Amino acid sequence: MTVVDAPTGLVAAIREAAVQCPDTVAMTFVDYSTDRTGVAEEVTYGQLNDRARAVAGALSASSAPGDRAAILCPHTADYVAALLGCLYAGVLAVPLYAPDGFRTDDRLHLAMADCAPTVVLTTTAYEDQTEALCGKLPGSRAPQVVRVDRIDPALGRSVVLPVVEYPDTTAYLQYTSGSTRNPAGIEVTHQNLAAGAAQLCGGLGIDERARITGWLPFFHDMGLLLMIAVPLIARVPAVLMAPFAFVQQPARWLRLISAHRATHTVSPNFGLDLCVDRVAERGTERLDLSSLRTLVNGSEPVRAPSLQRFSDRFAGYGFRPEAHCPSYGLAEATLAVTLGTRHAPRVLTLDRAALAENRVLPLQEGDPAGYPVVGCGVPADQEVRIVEPRTRARVPAGGTGEVWVRGANVCAGYWGHPERTAKVFGAHPAADVDAAGGPWLRTGDLGFLDGGELFLTGRLKDLIVVDGRNHHPADLELTVQEADTALRRGHVAAFPAALPGDGAERVVVVAELDRPRDVADPARVRADVRTALLARHSLDLSDVVLVRRGAIPKTTSGKIRRSACRELYLSGALADATVDGAR
């Protein structure tokens, strides 16, 4: 069995497949919006290529190479055709999402205002919302709205498309799920895309017998690479469903894995917790997860308890712990930086006091003074270094620092933001770090290497310093959610806030209650949180705020937006969501 090699680019891959195996099914899209059991739409390589070329023809009539085309399509074959059509036409794709009312339009508006598209690709069902959104954009000329589902695929067989994939030209702009106030599109070149796909194919063991299933949104880097690019470039079938369908019924994802004998799938950590908490025994008797070789876990911190709970819950259905594949990556590196080692994940228990001093001191598993961190695998055909962020000196073994990355997958920079690009993508280390090979990407993430494997400890910008000691928010949040069963897993935010008067930094915790109506004594829950943090971290909280479900802001990939939560807290905007009870 040989690992599939990625060709030169995504357009080359679909074009070759359309010639060599036009009638082979490339992707299957399962729609649950009209039928609870799902309606499958199969799309062959030939059909997908025709649809993509037809979109490219429509784009060529109204846009020039280098113009931007925002993709506001639903999670269907139309989205994939729109993306490929942009690449065919040499137009910079901007993968976004349909304005469906479930997500704030602020993100769409700010991203589109930043990239200034000349055309917006959507479908008939979302035409009115898209037109309204375009009408609010700055500038005297609104972008043209093109309905992808109304373009005749037959046009793709006759259209002339002279543009080819030049490795160093930008293929698309990837907007991350972080800040809404200062969006910046990451310039992903055709070379970045090909390198990222090749790293995933090699690191995950994608071979001719691979079958991919998933629910991640296409507008995220992980969804775009693993749900679209890798299946098409590696020429392996993919069975896909919409994220909302998964959130409605997590069992749908597991049933697709079982029914289609999937070998590879992917989910952020919260997806595993959702399955454990909401997939009932009834109706899953025939579930078979034994075909699954790899479950990539990324996009947010990987939690050791989540891995164990998922393994325990679904062991009876054939799931093997070694299928867990914790990973680390970021959009600026075209997704993957490190990938799991195809063995059961490594978990180290670290001394919290030593970690506060940027030292790595392993303890015995289960030690109450310890903080469990999960290994995120080894570098995927790229260089990874741990660097002291202020001096830019290489951190010796046994210490923590900022993760720096260098490789063919590292993107060109932020579109239209040269100063920000130079700061993040143009890092030059001190002399004791290998300076050959060009600048490094500063990830802003903190961690260390052990046995060649990367372990993450937090975010540089989120680090909380109280009385000269470092506290990692993820560690504090884990302690909080374990302090009381009334708290909702994965929905806790810890952040610093200055005390009135002396301006000293103290820590505030905002936590969602799982079932607020069932909590008779919120004051007791707050006391449990304070006691746990005092006992485990020697940390006296400034405030503990209990809120209703959904009150804590998260990114569209499921990460806690701590800075946004802090702003809500300081402005008093959390008051309406706060659960009554003495603090």
Image (cartoon, rainbow, N blue to C red):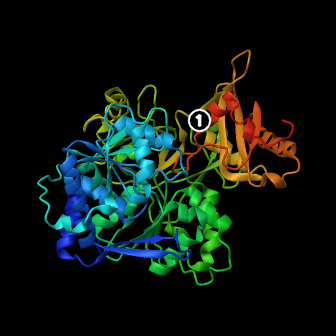
Q: Position of residue 59 (x, y in %)?
A: 23, 51
Q: Which residue occupies 62% across, 62% down?
A: 274
Horizontal relation, residue 569 to residue 35: left or right = right
Instruction: Check disc 1 and give the amino acid type.
Output: Ala
Horizontal relation, residue 115 to residue 493: left or right = left
Report the residue that reaches farthest toward the bottom: 286
Q: Nearer the viewer, residue 501 or 204?
A: 501
Q: Which residue occupies 44% across, 69% down?
A: 213
Residue 523 quadrant: top right
Q: Which residue occupies 46% across, 52% down?
A: 451
Q: Is residue 202 visible?
A: no
Q: Which residue occupies 11% across, 58% down?
A: 160
Q: Position of residue 73 (x, y in %)?
A: 40, 56
Q: Is residue 553 visible?
A: yes
Q: Nearer the viewer, residue 345 or 399?
A: 345
- Compared with 38, 466 (above or below) is above
Q: Position of residue 310 (x, y in %)?
A: 61, 66
- Compared with 255, 566 (above or below) is above
Which residue does the numbered mark 1 point to in the structure image?
Answer: 564
**Crowding near the residue tagged with mark 1, few <14, some 14–19, many ≥20 C-alpha atoms within 10 Å:** some
Dot 1 falls on a residue whose secondary structure is: helix
